[in-house]
Image: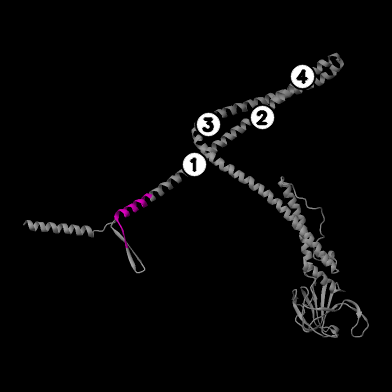
Amino acid sequence: MSKFRKENSDLEQLHRRISRLTRPSALTDRHLILRSHGRTAYIRVPRFLQAAGLLVVGAFVAWVVHASYAYVGYNQIVSAKDEAISARDQVSSTLRAELDDSRRSFAAATDSLEENHKGLVSLIGQNQTLKSNPQAVRLDLKQLEEARKKAEEAKREIAKRLEVLEAQLAETQSNNKALALDLKTTGAELTVALAEKNHVSQKGDALNNRVSELQKRLVEAKEAQTALVDRVADTSHAEAKRLSKIISTAGLNVEKLLRAQGVAPLPQGGPFEAAPKSNANKVEETIEASLSSTNGMIDHLEGLQRIVRGLPLAPPLDYYYVSSRYGVRTDPINKTKAMHRGVDFGAKHRATVFSSAPGKVIYAGWKGRFGRFVEIDHGNGVVTRYGHLRRIYVKRGQEITYRTKIGQMGNSGRSTGTHLHYEIHVNKRSVDPLKFMKAGKNVFKG
C-alpha cells in the first residue's frame, strides 16, 4: 500500500513538473539563432536580462512623461510671471511720467516767480534813482503802475498754476504711496523674477550688439552700392562715348539717330561725390541722385547700342580682298572716269554672301546692270546693296538677322569677273562702306 502511494506521489510530482515546464510564461529563457557562412550559433538570453531590459524601458518612458509635463508647466508659469511683470512695469512707467511732468511744471512756476521778483527789484531801484528828478518820476509812474498791474496779473496766473500743480502733486504723492504699497507686496515675486529678467536682459544686450553690427554693415553696404553705381556710371559713360565715336567714324549724325530712337539728349552734370561714412541719410540721397543720373546714362547707352546693332559694320564676306574702292575711278569697261558708289570685293567663285546687319529685304531679283541684286533696309535710313550675285537665297519682305546667308558671289550683270559689288546708303545718299567696316573693327575690339 505504501509502495502504491509512493508511486502516486511520484507520478503527481512528475505531472506538476511537466505542467510547470509547459506553462507559457512572459519571461522564459530565449535563444537567438545566428547563421553565417553555413555555421549556426545560439545565444542564450536568460530571464534576469529580459527583466532588466523591461525595467530600463519602463524607467525611460516614465522619465520622458515626467520631463514633458515639467517643461509644459514651467513654460506656463514663466509666461504668467512675464505678463505680471509687464503690467507692473507699465503702471510704474506711467506714474513716473506723471511725477516728472509735475516736477517740470513746479520748476517752471518757480522760475517765473523769480523773474517777476527780479523785475520788481529793478523797478524799485529805478524809482530810487529817479527821486531826484520829480518830473521824470511822474512820467514813469504810469509805466510803473501798468507794469505793477501786469505783474499782479502774472502773479494771479502763477498762483492758479500753483494750485493746479499742488493738486497734481498731491495726486501724484497718493499714487506714489499706493505704488509703494504695491511694490512692497510684490517685492518677493519681483526678486524671483529679476533673475529671469536679467537673463533676458543679457540676451537683449546681445541682440542690441547684433543690431548695431548689422546697422554698421548696412551703412558699409550702402557705401559699396554708391561706389558700384559710380563705377557703372563711369563705365556706361565711357562705353557711350566709344559707341558715339564709332557711329561718327561711320559718317553718321549721332544726335539725329538718337532722336529717331526716341532717346533724349544726354543730361550733363558734375562728378559723382560719395557721402561721408558717418551720415547714412546723405549716403541714401547720394545713391538716389547717382541712380537717377545713371538711369539716364544707361538709357542713352541702350539707344546707342540699338543703333550700333542695326548698322552694317561687318563685311559681307568671310574671306575677301578689295578690288575697287569707293569714289571716282577708271571704268573697267569703257576706260573713262566714272563715279563708283560702292566697293568691289574679290573672293573665290560661289563664295557665300552674308547680311552685314539685321533688317528687312526690300528687293531681291534681277536689276539691270547690277545683275542678280539684293537690297536690305536696316532702319534709321540705312540701306545695303549686294550686286552681281550668282544665286539669291532670300526673298522680298523677309526679315533677316545678322550674318544671314543672302546669296552666292557671281558675275551677273555688267561685270568683268566674279566679284561682289557692295553699297551702303544713308538717307538715300551713298557712303563709303569701308568707313563702316573700319568702325566695325573698333566695335569688335571693345
Whole-number angstrom distance, CA of label 2 to CA of label 1: 39 Å
Whether residue 3 is visible to the viewer of this picture, yes or no, is yes
**Closer to us: 209 or 139:** 209
Which numbered tag is attached to residue 104? Answer: 2
Q: Could you tell which of marks 2 and 1 lies nearer the N-terminus?
A: 1
Of the image marks 4 and 1, the number of the one nearer the N terminus:
1
Q: Position of residue 409 (x, y in %)?
A: 79, 82
**Badge 4 is on which residue?**
121
Q: Amino acid at mark 2?
A: Arg
Residue 425 falls in which quadrant of the image? bottom right
Element under disc 4: helix
Q: Amino acid at mark 4?
A: Val
Instruction: Classify mark 4: residues with Cα within 10 Å, few (<14), some (14-19) or many (20+).
Output: few
User: Is residue 258 among the parts visible in the rendering?
Assistant: no
Which residue is the site of mark 3?
Answer: 183
Q: Which mark is residue 37?
A: none
Secondary structure under tag 1 reads: helix
On screen, residue 323 versus residue 108, left or right, reads right
218 vs 40: above or below:
above
Q: Nearer the viewer, residue 333 or 148?
A: 333
In the rendered view, tell whether residue 286 sits above or below residue 145: below
- Residue under pointer 1: 78
Indicate the colouring scheme: one colour
Left or right of residue 135: residue 56: left
* Mark 3 element type: helix
